[in-house]
Image (cartoon, rainbow, N blue to C red):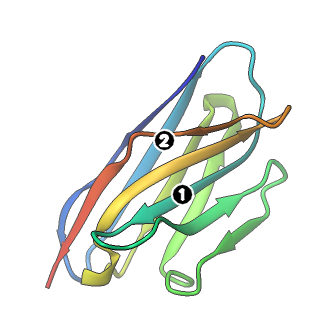
Amino acid sequence: QVQLVESGGGLVQAGGSLRLSCAASGSRFSISGMGWYRQAPGNQRELVAVITSGGSTNYADSVKGRFTISRDNAKNTVYLQMNSLKPEDTAVYYCKIWAFGGMVYWGKGTLVTVSS
């Protein structure tokens, strides 16, 4: 069983910053890719950023230049540094990991609210 615990969400003013963390724990798993998705009210869940086991990254166009994804393999943790936040970034942010062998795991989400 793999568990993902997200933290770092909250309320911030437009232009501010937040750092999200997602720590994976459990037994008998080896992480391949890690990523962040978000879902705003009334919208579908969308990709924000992903990072491969080799460190390659990919971002949604809407967050390029403002968000940075990183990972600490020793801690099985993925981070999302969010700068220059905008009201349209308001959403529940979910982390996702891909394990070698094909399993996929989701966190429960953390709410980010950006006030104007």
On-image quarter of the N terminus: top right
The answer, for residue 86, to whether it is visible in the render is no
Mark 1 element type: strand
On-image quarter of the C terminus: bottom left
The answer, for residue 58, to whether it is visible in the render is yes
Please indicate whether residue 69 sits to the left or right of residue 89 in the image: right
- Cα–Cα gap, marks 2 and 1: 9 Å
Please indicate whether residue 84 sits to the left or right of residue 77 in the image: left
Nearest the camera: 8 or 100? 100
In the image, residue 70 sits, relative to residue 46, either above or below, namely above
Q: Where is residue 71 in the image (x, y as percent from the top left)?
A: 63, 48
Q: Nearer the viewer, mark 2 or mark 1?
A: 1
Query: What amino acid does circle 2 point to?
Result: Cys
Q: Where is residue 2 in the image (x, y as percent from the top left)?
A: 59, 23
Q: Where is mark 1, residue-wise?
A: 36
Q: Where is mark 2, residue-wise?
A: 22
Query: What amino acid does circle 1 point to?
Result: Trp
> Residue drawn 27% across and 69% down?
41
> Residue drawn 70% across and 71% down?
58
Q: Where is residue 98 in the image (x, y as percent from the top left)?
A: 72, 42
Mark 2 element type: strand
In the image, residue 104 sits, relative to residue 95, either above or below, namely above
Q: Looking at the rendering, which quadrant does residue 100 occupy?
A: top right
Which of marks 1 and 2 precedes in the sequence? 2
> Residue drawn 70% across and 37% down?
73
Nearest the camera: 106 or 51? 106
Asked if labels 1 and 2 touch by Cβ distance under 8 angstroms, the answer is yes
Please indicate whether residue 83 sits to the left or right of residue 78 in the image: left
Nearest the camera: 56 or 42? 42
